[in-house]
Structures are given as C-alpha cells and as structure tokens.
Amino acid sequence: VQLQASGGGSVQTGGSLRLSCASSGSVYSMYSMAWYRQTPGNQRELVAAIVRGTGIDYADSVKGRFTISRDNAENMIYLQMTDLKPEDTAVYYCNGVRTFRGPDYWGQGTQVTVSS
C-alpha cells in the first residue's frame, strides 16, 4: 500500500487547512488510518486516528479543532484543521495499519507552518 499526503502549506494563526491522503489500497479494510506529526528533534506524535472497533480518537491538543474523516469510495483520508496555532507547525504524516499486528504504512510528510 502506498500513501500520498498533500495539502500542507503556510497559514496564519486562526487559519485552516485540509490535509489529504490518497491510498493505493482500500482504506476501509485497514485496521486503522491516522495522521501523525513531527517537529525537529521530537518523536512523531499521533494527531488523530480512525480505529476499527474503537472509533475516532484525537490528541488532546487538537480536540475541537481538527477533524479526521475517511472516504471509502475514493480511498482517501482527510484531516480538516481549523483554528490553527503556531504549535501546530510540523510535518504531518499519513499512516495506515493493515491489521492489529501490522504491517503499517507511511506516506511522505507534508509541511504545515502556522505563523503568529
């Protein structure tokens, strides 16, 4: 499975962006689909995930501002980001996990920069 993320860019505080992730395989069949982000010198952190049997989960820092969604017909995952803050600046990665035991797949990152 190949994942292709897009939609990053530069916005000012309070702005919005929508990230997209195109999958070469079925997103519906995945155990989970998620967005992670990473800043220089830090570990990659979970932002939002859709997990089979569990539902949707968000990092506390983005709850109420970010929305993850899935289009099964188009094999796409989206991350709608609103009320962006400078601390949201990071490289965002799309992730898919085939089964509970893996394997997992990563897309290339897309840069999001929020200026104050």
Image (cartoon, grey):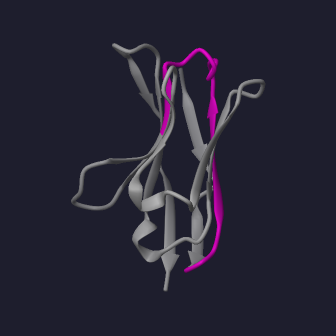
Tell me what residue is drawn at x 61 percent, y 49 percent: 6
Front-lying residue, 6 or 102? 102
Instruction: Determine if the magenta segment contains residue 107.
Output: no
Q: Is residue 6 visible in this depiction of the protein?
A: yes
Q: Is residue 69 left or right of residue 55?
A: right
- Up-down relation of residue 89 to residue 86 (above or below): above
Which image quarter: residue 90?
bottom left
Q: Is residue 40 left or right of residue 27?
A: left
Instruction: Determine if the magenta segment contains residue 21.
Output: yes
Q: Position of residue 14 (x, y in %)?
A: 59, 78
Q: Position of residue 4 (x, y in %)?
A: 58, 37
What span is colored magenta in the figure? Answer: 13-34
- Up-down relation of residue 110 to residue 83 (above or below): above
Q: Is residue 108 visible in this depiction of the protein?
A: no
Q: How many marks?
A: 0
Front-lying residue, 12 or 32? 32
- Up-down relation of residue 59 to residue 102 (above or below): below
Q: Position of residue 99 (x, y in %)?
A: 43, 13
Tell me what residue is drawn at x 76 percent, y 28 percent: 74
